[in-house]
Image (spheres, grey):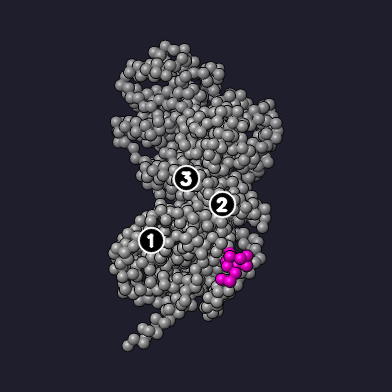
Amino acid sequence: MSTGREAILGRIREALKLSAPMPGDHGPIAESDSDHAHPAPGAPAEIRAWLPPVGANYEENAAIFARNSEDLKTAFLRCPTRAAAHEALQKLAAEEKWARVAFHQSPLIDDAVAALGLPALETKFGYDVHTLERCDAGITACDALIAQTGTILLTATSAGGRTLSVLPPHHVVLATGDQLLPDLSSAYEILARKYGSALPSFVTLITGPSRTGDIERILVLGAHGPKQLTVVLVEE
Amino acid sequence: MRVSLMVPCFVNQFYPRAAMAMVEVLERLGHTVEFPEEFTCCGQPPFNSGFWDEARPVACQALQNFSDAEVVVGGSGSCVSMMRVFSPELFRGRKEEQLAREVAAKTFEFSEFLVDKCGVTDVGASFPATVTFHDGCHGLRELGIKRPARELLKNVRGLTLIEMTEAETCCGFGGTFAVKFPMISTSMGEVKSASICATGADYVVSNDSSCLMQIQGILDKQGKPIKSLHLAEVLAKQ
Amino acid sequence: MNSTASSFLDNAKRVTADLRHRSLIQNALKGYLVKRDEKKAQFKDWQHARQTAAEIKWDAINHLDRYLAEFADKAEANGAKVFWASSADEARNYILDVAKQHSVKSIVKSKTMTGEEIHLGQALEKAGIRVVESDLGELIVQLREEPPYHIVFPSMHLTRHEISDLFQKKLGSEPTDQPEELTMIARRAIRGEYIKADMGISGANFAVAETGMISITENEGNARLSTALPRVHVAIVGIEKIIPRMEHLALFLPMLATAGAGQALTCYNSLIGGPRKADEADGPGEFHIVLLDNGRTQLLADPEQRDALHCIRCGACLNVCPIFKNVGGHTYGTTYQGPIGSVITPHLRGLQQWKHLSQASSLCGACSEACPVKINLHHHLLHNRRNAVGEHAPFFEKIAMKIFAQVATKPKLFEILSGWARFGEKLIGLVRGTRLDPLGAWTRTRSFPNSAPKNFKEMWRERGTKVEAKP
């Protein structure tokens, strides 16, 4: 196997002996300096300067998140207390006639699921996939909410594995106010800060409920993942 | 300014009035117009077909035609692109590269010359008609010209400009492409024609005669009464 | 003319004559353009974003040896098995071996153009393994036994009625004209496949050197399910997919979504860094990454066109290409359609065999303008034309060009011949509309202008005499 590696890397090194013009520059092709003088491009500050604007404070970012959620067809519920969040969940469960939910052990989730008083499947230590498939909702925590794009950041560690947030027809996310971030660059900063070099095996950015436009470019929700996505923001 | 006019072969043959209109407008603005009669072609046909060796002597002659010019002005975004963008690439690393870069730096498309170089947006023209404007791709994307022609048209007395939705979409000409792949070229022309007709304009105006040859060709075949005019022909009307 | 070129011409003829097909594609892409422009406008500065994206990819591609080694080392440290495949054959054989080792009977696949490139699905099916495409569009074209029509919108050439008929025939569903109902039919059909499959196969949109993780962009959730439920996950990754750092995704993900689908961000952007970890609830027990060269290093060796490896496969160049919009995706006969396909296919599969794609362009440049990583696509078409002529120039065209160059460099001769043209067109007028018409390729569908009674040179000279005669 290492021979394959050496063969490809060898061809690459050979190919790179001639240097290519920089983007936007159609200057002459020259011998390559092995280490070019340009600083590495794409620092977060540079990226932030071009991406869509974000709010200056919590309230503004919450408003941007709300606006993006509306466009994406994500239900976004702001709740002043945990108790209010539990109530909102109970209302949702009643409206949609949930019979069974799935969740993962986590401080924010445990109480909420207990308050629902429904049969519940816990995924943290392994589960039967058929049982998970029959659950009406998957309730998870997350790592962050991102105002800029109306996105949820979660990982296999923060959200009970890879499947809980995608297999049941309704994904409910519980988040706290301090988890609301302005932009994508801050999401990657949080990941690095929280996990260091030991990132979970799975990290995902969720932006709205599952969708497709593969038939005549017409938007349909719930292609393979959840048809509904609800974000409950506990702002206490 | 002393303006050297670049009149491409097909304009000389089929559309001399467009070139003469440029002369009239430039002289009206006080410029001295010169016309190097030995100029035949910028070299684009062989260049675009991949025959760079055959393109070089033609392009080199064109460079020499204009080596003493103060500024070179052309009425075709495509030929101007050849002089400004592709000639330097064609002669890269060769002894003519310096000359190619010098000529490139003083070559302008007609509307660009008037508006960006001379700061003129009103040439005193009058043309009571409804027109729509087609952006030639080379002018638009190789030279980055979109605004100048519109500013000039805005100041033509009596003229109404109605933008078509596909103004920036290629008409399908593309030089030898038009005869190597006539079915694709024609389909593209039909999209263009539909967009032109949807505006209800009487004239379709452009700053590239080669596009207009394709567009008029399609419109005629479809029996549409819309006529094509080079921008200079509109600006020459008083 | 070779067979790929003649089938391109035949198909182009057929599709350009099919007004229904053309308007289906053109209308779909009109909707895309509106959304894309809306999302582009939300960027503080889209043009600078493109420049930064191009510079990051330049850095990645021009130091590919370093970043690729870093990626592989990190991925292996995360528990992934990395296989370096020089060719399509090596990649297929490796994946077949992995499937055999795990006694794989059924595979669920999420969309991978690299998988299409190496005809992976066919190879697995030939080995007796059940392969199900999970992406809706890919499933549709799989059921039709045809290749994807577009690298991002594989089934955009079909109407709901055609899809309904297909599902009736192949999935035994009831007829419907509701896209929503059709989507649910596919959802129900594929659900069980995720659970049943022994192996999940995916591509990757990016490979992050810093963390050794792959990034997968999707909207449907099928890639998430395909990479979570089966016990083995194999990802096929072209070596050009490298980006140096995770934080670069903050730029590339929104740009890919905006340019590719007119979305601010696609629904799911997942990073996968290895098999299930000991403290994680689920995930495959094995994760294989196949790094594929398959001609890419050949393109890398051409500094003039190296930036074609910056491509993030967003499909924007197809969506704005007037050629694509009039000939459709299948006409190209390539894995990668549209301008990017016309640029890279000659490098990956042979210049003489695929040079016609570079000729079938008006060089309008809409592709280069739309490209989020600023690949100089339409100039590369010119480079391919030059390279093709340099290798092997068609005899008659070469003669014609030589004559043209001879005449055009002799202004007097040029002028005499221009005068004769007026006479010539009278002769041509006699055969217009017949097979003898040398301008037939033009005049069958377009009028051709007549020479002006006086050409510009004559008008200019007359004018000069008049001016001189004045005083």
| Res A52 label | none
Classify mark 2: helix, strand or loop.
Answer: loop
Position of C212 with respect to A83 (left or right) is right
| Other-residue count near label 1 (Cα within 10 Å), few / some / many at <14 / 14–19 / ≥20 | some
What x and y, as percent, mark residue A155? 47, 27
Q: Residue at x 40, y 29 (%)?
A: A74
Q: Is residue C70 shown to the viewer in this render?
A: no
Q: Residues in magenta?
A: C429-440
Residue behind mark 1: B202
What x and y, as percent, mark residue C303? 55, 54
Amino acid carrying mark 2 in the image: Ala
Residue behind mark 3: C27
| Other-residue count near label 3 (Cα within 10 Å), few / some / many at <14 / 14–19 / ≥20 | some
Q: Residue at x 45, y 52 (%)?
A: C369
Amino acid carrying mark 1 in the image: Asp
Residue C388 occupies quadrant: bottom right
Q: Is residue A48 shown to the viewer in this render?
A: yes
Q: Residue at x 52, y 20 (%)?
A: A133
Residue behind mark 2: C17
Q: Chain of mark 2?
A: C
